[in-house]
Image: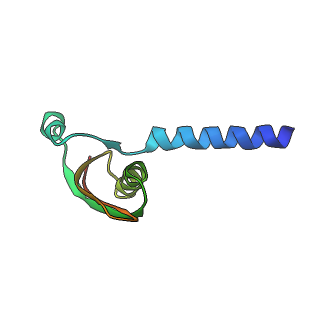
Amino acid sequence: MKIASGIVAALVMGSLSFGAFAAKEIQKDEVAKMHLTKIGSVTTSRTTSPMDAKKDLSKKADEKGGKYFVVIAGEKNEKNVHANADVYK
């Protein structure tokens, strides 16, 4: 019983920590208002849903040191979702 409780607690904490440190998606018009600096671009192509694509873009933006990302292109074919985003901090 204690092991199951520990596993559930670890999963909950892991999901909360992703949200706390993940780069946030914003709209293009917010970039100028927030005086952000573009630091690069990221892409994803091995995801199967739009939500997974956003999570992957957020993770990759984090790895570049970004706090925000703006999706600039997206496409879904039969199996995968492809997306591109600009990264800002």
Name above or below for residue 74 compared with residue 2: below
Figure check: 19 above or below 41: above
Residue 11 found in image quarter: top right
Query: x, y (%) of residue 37?
Result: 19, 48
Tally of numbered discs = 0
User: What percent of the width, then of the height, locates residue 69?
Assistant: 28, 48
In this rendered view, identify the residue nearer to me: 11 or 66.
11
- Residue 53 lies left or right of residue 34; in this view the side is right
Q: Is residue 2 left or right of residue 36?
A: right
Rendered-image quadrant of the N terminus: top right
| Position above or below: 87 against 29 | below
Residue 29 spot, x, y in % from top left: 14, 38
In x, y percent, where is residue 57? 36, 54
Q: Nearer the viewer, residue 61 or 8?
A: 8
Give the vertical position of 7 relative to 79 (above or below): above
Answer with the quarter of the image where residue 35 lies.
top left
Which residue does the image show at 37% across and 51% down from the upper left? 50
Q: Nearer the viewer, residue 36 or 11?
A: 11
